[in-house]
Amino acid sequence: MALAAVLDQSEPNAQLLAQRTIERLTMGDAFDAKLRQRIWVSGRDIVGVGHYEQSGRGTGRYSLEMTIHDGDTKQTMKQISDGKLAWHRAQIGGAVTLRRVDLGRIDEFERETMASQSTVAVSPPPNQQVSYIAAQSTDPLPSRLLVGGLVELIDRIRVDYVLKLKKGTVERKPVWFLQGRLRDDVRARIDAESGRRVWAPLCPVEVKVAISATADATGFGAGLPLQIEFYSAPPTAFQTTGLQTKGSQETLAVQPVSASSNDEGASSPKPSPVVEGSPAGRIISLLEVYAMRKIEASPEERFRFISDDREATFTNDTRRYLDRISPSMTP
């Protein structure tokens, strides 16, 4: 399915807000914030805490760190990019995994793809999903800016979910809610990739993102994400469709690291305020972005990844992002 048609399934204003949010993260002022993630699994409320920093201004520099204690093991995750290489490090107990994305190669491949397609006059590559509309520009963002951090999380929600725009409040602050359900073709892709026939209760099929509608006293913060909620399917859906998998957000840092498929007895969390058409399933994960403040951009050295894992080897994840630009042209 062409990506333009996919995005047309969402409300135009919802897509526009998602685009503008990505723009503000990638092209706006540098900021940092605290993170808190809550995961409801096996009747427990698991809490993770972390820190986020994004340089903005098109640098592609960010750092995201999260630590989660699940009662048995300590799980840590770090994503960091200096605008040239993006790294993802995850550690569960003593097991460490490393992934790297070559952002320079993404830029190079995107230029080659655009040049080739302008010559043969075919449709824009899939990753040119829409024009990210800025105040005085309609140029699309470079694909390298969509790798990792809060940016990739919002971008994948924008692409994988059919979104609607709603008004509401979070802690008495006015917000816009981007709320939606997992697209049918994404469900079908997950089904085909996993080969399973039962949809896992912890697979997120609905999402609700709160975007700040107002700025703080310094004039900063409007249009930035405050919290992201993922919901399971309604109980009846578990019996009729889907498969057991990590879902469409499997590569994102804020998803549960491990989960049991028997969670119907989990404690009932408190989601964001109910609005018309709220998700019908149970909330399974909540990411909060708070204590957000505008800062001076840190130097590039701050975002360079230094590994102390002498025995760990990294996996090159670049191909997966090249496939998003043009699957048929990936070398």
Image: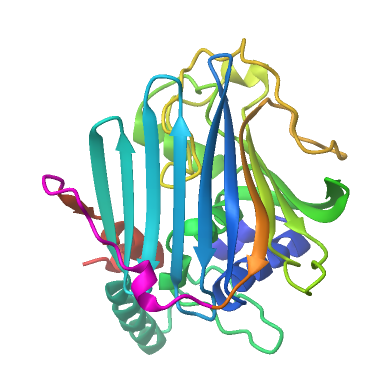
Q: Residue at horizontal 46%, vertical 65%?
A: 62
Q: Residue at horizontal 29%, vertical 76%?
A: 104
What span is colored magenta in the figure? 297-312
- Residue 299 is covered by the magenta coloring: yes
Residue 293 or 271: which is nearer the viewer?
Answer: 293
Main SS class of the magenta portion in the image: loop
Residue 44 or 135: which is nearer the viewer?
Answer: 44
Residue at the limit of the structure toward the left, as seen here:
311
Count of marks overlaid on the render: 0
- The x and y percentages for residue 91 are 31, 38
The answer to whether residue 246 of the structure is visible from this angle is: yes
Is residue 30 shown left or right of residue 166? left
- The x and y percentages for residue 134 are 67, 81
- The x and y percentages for residue 142 are 46, 77
User: Which image quarter holds the C terminus?
Assistant: bottom left
Residue 283 or 71: which is nearer the viewer?
Answer: 71
Is residue 298 shown left or right of residue 133? left
Residue 306 or 130: which is nearer the viewer?
Answer: 306
Is residue 331 shown left or right of residue 132? left
Is 44 above or below relative to 281?
above
Q: Quadrant of residue 281?
A: top right
- The x and y percentages for residue 21 are 66, 66
- Residue 48 is covered by the magenta coloring: no
Q: Quadrant of residue 324?
A: bottom left
Is residue 321 shown left or right of residue 105? right
